[in-house]
Image (cartoon, helix red, strand yellow):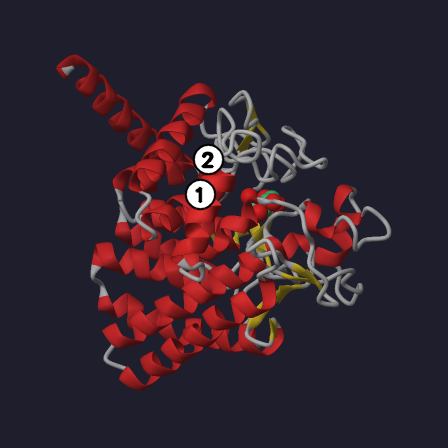
Amino acid sequence: MVKQQSKKSCETTAIIAAANELLLKNRRTVAGHMFTIPSPYEYRHQWLWDSCFHAIVLRHFDTEAAEEELRSLMASQKPSGMVPHESKYVLLSRMLPYTSRITQPPIIARAVLDLYKKSRNREFLAEIFPKLQHYHNWLAEKREAGNVLKVVDSNESGEDNSVLWDDELTIPVHRTYLRWLTTYVPFFPQLAAVISVKATSFYADSLGCMAEIAKTLGNTGQSGSYRKKHSAVIAAMAKAFRQKDGLYYSLTGKGKPIPYKTNSLFAPMYCGAATRKEAMMLVKEHLLNEKEFWTQFPIPTVAADEKKFNPKGYWRGPMWVNINWMLHRGLLRYGFKAVADELLQKTIAAVRKSGFREYYNPLTGEGLGARQFGWSTLVADMMLR
Ligand code: GLC
């Protein structure tokens, strides 16, 4: 027993040390901005939600580096308040003043708050808060559809090749190089918006974080407004997304439910929008169901019994560590401690088997996509919570 325990704690220490090492290896400084690239093999710039995930892990090792990561991210903020999904393009070691024209799920305030809980650095909070306010004003103005959030392009959802767009696109833009046009080329029309359960869940959580940050800074008025907005978004979610089967589905731009069972079903647990009864049903009937989400290396991005499930297809079946991280938090929020632990153990098993890869076959644990992939180190944050 003692032997077994110490083997486990050695493994834990090794994974945490490897996470730290990877983030150091992927660190770059470009034109005075220090940030972490997702992978040296495929993604050599700064990416929005990747950097937030990197900062969430980095806070355990080096809070100043985590602050730099977020400072660098906000340095790409547009005058409108928008934060682009990709920035810090480099050509021959020089930064190009060019950014993508879409954003990514709003998780910056979450990263800032989690980091603050480790660093207790109020100065950094005070420095970044006005930028976050500007960003949230932009989200409210440009991305809200009646208190829930729409994403204007599949790349903006962060799940570039998600099945949620399949029935909306007349040409399979998301599967070809053509996706580049809607993301990077100015004025090229965006092809299809989705009113998204996942993006709204991140948004609701983000508003809660803003309320807490404002309160910490002694700004009770602002804190109250964010709290109010947070409640309004949570209330709007059930109204907009809940269908007859009790599950929350994203909607097409025209408001039609998109009834595929994807990992987004669990997003309302992340932000606390699901009722206890709904959470229980989600966990018992869907998460722990071996035919749907409880595969050997869970969770698949798309339920294993969906026709569209493809265990190796980009965002169309594989396990991604950032999704497990989100689910892990949701499970803990609703008191499913044993299930959260099991999910963590299964995530560790995939990382132990295949290293920090971009995504994993949920049936075999085989590592797929980019190597030395930054946000897969989120497993360390799951372990250190
Ligand atoms: C891919 C992913 C996206 C991520 C980016 C960098 O485009 O789909 O979510 O931000 O790679 O890792």
Whether the residue under disc 2 has CB within 8 Å of ligand 1: no
Q: Residue at x 57, y 35 (%)?
A: 292
Q: Which residue is mark 2?
A: 288
Q: Which residue is mark 1?
A: 283
The quadrant in which residue 183 appears is bottom right
Mark 1–mark 2 CB contact (< 8 Å): yes
Is residue 75 something one can see in this rendering? no
Relative side of 207 to 141, left or right: left
Residue closest to the eye, 333 or 211: 333
Q: Position of residue 239 (x, y in %)?
A: 56, 69
Relative side of 150 to 273, left or right: right
Q: Name the residue type under label 2.
A: Leu
Q: Position of residue 268 (x, y in %)?
A: 47, 57
The quadrant of the image that shows the C terminus is top left
Name of the residue lying farthest toward the right: 170
Residue closest to the eye, 278 or 155: 278
Q: Quadrant of ligand 1?
A: top right
